[in-house]
Image (tube, rainbow, N blue to C red):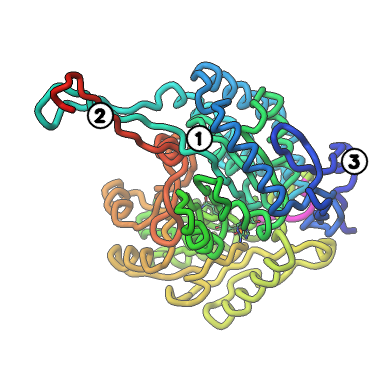
Amino acid sequence: MTFTVQPHRESLGLKTGQLYIGGQWGPAADGATWTHRHPGTGEEIGEFASGGAADVDAAVAAARAAFDEGRWATERAGVRVALLHRYAQLLRDHADELRALQALDNSVPISFGAIYATSVGAAADVFDHHAGWVDKIGGQTLPPYQGGDHLAMTFREPIGVVSAILPWNAPFLLFAQKVAPALAAGCTIVLKPSEYCTFSVLRMVELLVEAGLPEGVLNVVTGQGDPVGEAMITHPGVDKVSFTGSRAVGKHIVEASAATLKRVSLELGGKSPALVFGDAGNVGLAAATVVGAVTMGLSGQACVANTRALVHRDVYDEFIGAAQGMAAAVTYGDPFDAGVISAPLINEKQLDRVLGYIEKGKEEGRLVTGGERLGGDLAAGNFVAPTIFADVDNSATIAQEEIFGPVLAVVPFSDEDEAIALANDTEYGLGAGVFTSDVQRAFRVSRKLRAGTVGVNGFQIEPHLPFGGFKQSGLGREGGRSAIEAYTEEKSVFLPLTDEMM
Ligand code: NAD
């Protein structure tokens, strides 16, 4: 029998989603709403306000006032540090509730909470980490370059009003990666969650209000990419756009924001390679790691998932066998069932897209396992079987394009130089994995890969480690000092100490 998530919806007492502008919760100016349907069952989960340009105007005005009148930007460091730590603790206290809300939003299973990077705990750590920056955002005093008695110094100042636009797939981490450094730097924010993952983000906002955030500092406009996101990237009152999502929308943001020359940070997609060498200590573990990332939890709907496995011919058959075994172990269904470890695709559009790539893959490679939509008890949801294609040429569509589903393309290679060349032969450059027991090879290869993050025999995202993409995977970095720099402008001040210099 098809499962239902309705009892969880009832017990969580989901409220109607509203916009949060200038410290007030309320409906969209024109009263429009959007009904969210669960991707695993098709059930109606709830309605939330579907904003428009007028709502973005109001949100930007509130953020502008909070910034320009200094309610947050000039608040003393101690107050900001305490608030961010307080919020981190509130997140930890509400981790179970947030995980359950996420399961209603995007059907990512509650068992996935054990994976650090996308957990509520990781989001809390990101806030704690950035709280540590607040009282360390400083500039330099430099020695005089010319003659004469003067001071030359720099300051780092908050960039202003930030439009923060989120995708649907990892709400906790991605909310934190934008909001924590922006608040730490003294910026104010207009935030848009994805229309496919709104309720868990609204709860995160409620908790931020509970932590004591002053009104106007963070404003939320829920709704569609167009008109809400569109207004957020073109509004003259916005100083910076921070976006995580697809490459297509990322490119559009660069064009649309050019008219007012906004600062732009982009975290986009990838086609990340895993390089499995003949000396990989444990080929079975390497296969389980790669296939796990492409099938478990988000069902391959993860930007850094290693969706291209480049495997040395010496261990090729062993890898394929182990990968097949791992794929067979992935379980689907009710996200509240602790035994379920993967998710459906987020919507029907994405389901059709992934099935289209799978048909293409049947022409471009050898189907090892999967290759179909799951039926039976799961027929009401957007479930696709873990799919592995072997003997794929690196130039094939399924080895080059981001599929954003549980589809792995396996490409054989013969030596290290070939592996590096294949790995870098992509328009993307987000992540990469190197599986080897030779530490020199690990460093040698890692240095040559054109990717923002390289994992050696494993992969992790951490709050203090910059994360972002080379090439068409993005612009800029989130995490650590890089994030603080991304939300501040540098100012130079020159001050003669005598009248002679004037
Ligand atoms: P998407 O680009 O469809 O949507 C992302 C957000 O942009 C949503 O809030 C959407 O409403 C909004 N949007 C859509 N059109 C817009 C417009 N014209 N102007 C402004 N905003 C607009 O992406 P998605 O399907 O939500 O997420 C999947 C994509 O995100 C994948 O490509 C994935 O690789 C990428 N991603 C990247 C990272 C990273 O850190 N690099 C992390 C997660 C996801």
Q: In this view, does 183 lie to the left or right of 2?
A: left
Q: Is residue 300 above or below residue 370?
A: above
Residue at position x 44%, y 66% from top? 316
Which residue is disc 3 drawn over? 10
Q: Is residue 109 left or right of residue 186?
A: right
Q: Which amino acid does label 3 sit on?
A: Glu
Quarter of the image with the C terminus in it = top left
Q: What residue type is labelled 1?
A: Pro
Q: Is residue 56 above or below residue 225?
A: above
Residue 398 position, x and y percent, is 52, 73
Which residue is disc 2 drawn over? 494
Please indicate, yes or no, whether residue 430 appears anywhere in the rendered image.
yes
Label ID, residue 181 = 1
* Predominant SS along the magenta part: loop
Q: Distance between the residues labelled 2 and 3?
A: 62 Å
Say if the magenta span includes residue 330.
Answer: yes
Range of the magenta residues? 329-335
Q: How far apart are marks 1 and 3 (CA)?
A: 35 Å
Query: Of marks 2 and 3, which one's residue comes earlier in the chain?
Result: 3
Residue 235 position, x and y percent, is 58, 51
Mark 1 or mark 3: which is in front?
A: 1
Residue at position x 50%, y 52% from top? 267
